[in-house]
Image: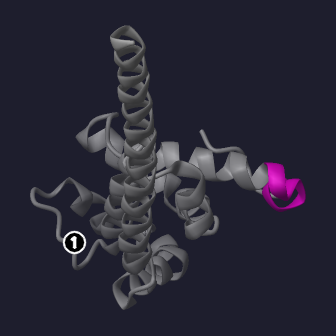
Amino acid sequence: MITTIQACASIGTFLIFVITAFLALRQLRLANRSSQLAGLQAVSSHFNGADFEKWFKFVLTELPIKMADRSFRESLGSNPIDRDAHLEIRLADLYEEVGVYAKYGVVSEMPLIEVLRGGPDTAWQALRATVSLYREIWGPSYYRNFEYLANRSRMFYGKLDPKRTSQRPAVT
């Protein structure tokens, strides 16, 4: 009789342990989702602000004209770089930071890319020549996470809408 009671107690203890482990894993998944959501919201707030719009507009409209100016190009070698004059560096720095988050899983990559709506690839295409010059001056490691994010964005949208991405040259 005592052996039966001990066996039932052991089974009960085991079941409680299994249920507790299951609930703990469930709680961890919920905490991870909550953390991912907070990360995506933080990133989204940066990409929906007035500064971001100003930087992106500068890159798309003014930068091609400014890059024709030798003194503007040479000022990329200044230490520190005047980030008020070089808004393209602010935009590239932001995408570089977000690229790190995506690359190392701080924020889930696919939801992040969807939240950014193709912006990384568009920005990379517009900044490629500038980043190339920047790398000549400061070294090849600069903006590799931005480039990673642009490539991942391009691959994602290439699967969804091949026509959209086929009209652009490949990211190198």
Q: Is residue 71 magenta?
A: no
Given residues 155 and 33, the one toward you in this image is: 33
Left or right placement of residue 138 versus residue 91 in this view = left
Please give the residue where the numbered disc 1 appears in the rendered image. Answer: 83
Residue sitting at x 47%, y 77%: 56
Left or right placement of residue 83 versus residue 58 in this view = left
Q: In x, y percent, where is residue 120?
A: 54, 60
In the image, farthest residue toward the right: 163
Given residues 172 and 44, the one toward you in this image is: 44
Q: Give the dominant element type of the magenta stretch: helix, strand or loop.
A: helix
**Magenta span of residues:** 159-166
Residue sitting at x 49%, y 59%: 127
In the image, farthest residue toward the front: 1
Dot 1: within a 10 Å radius of its alpha carbon, few (fewer than 14), some, or many (20 or more) residues? few
Given residues 69 and 145, the one toward you in this image is: 145
In the image, farthest residue toward the left: 79
Q: Quadrant of the N terminus?
A: top left
Q: Please count the marks in the image.
A: 1
Left or right placement of residue 84 versus residue 8 in this view = left
In the image, residue 159 above or below residue 60: above
In the image, residue 19 above or below residue 106: above
In the image, farthest residue toward the bottom: 50
Q: In x, y percent, where is residue 50?
A: 38, 90
Quadrant position of residue 130: bottom left
Residue type (three-letter) at the residue carrying disc 1 = Arg
Q: Quadrant of the C terminus?
A: top right
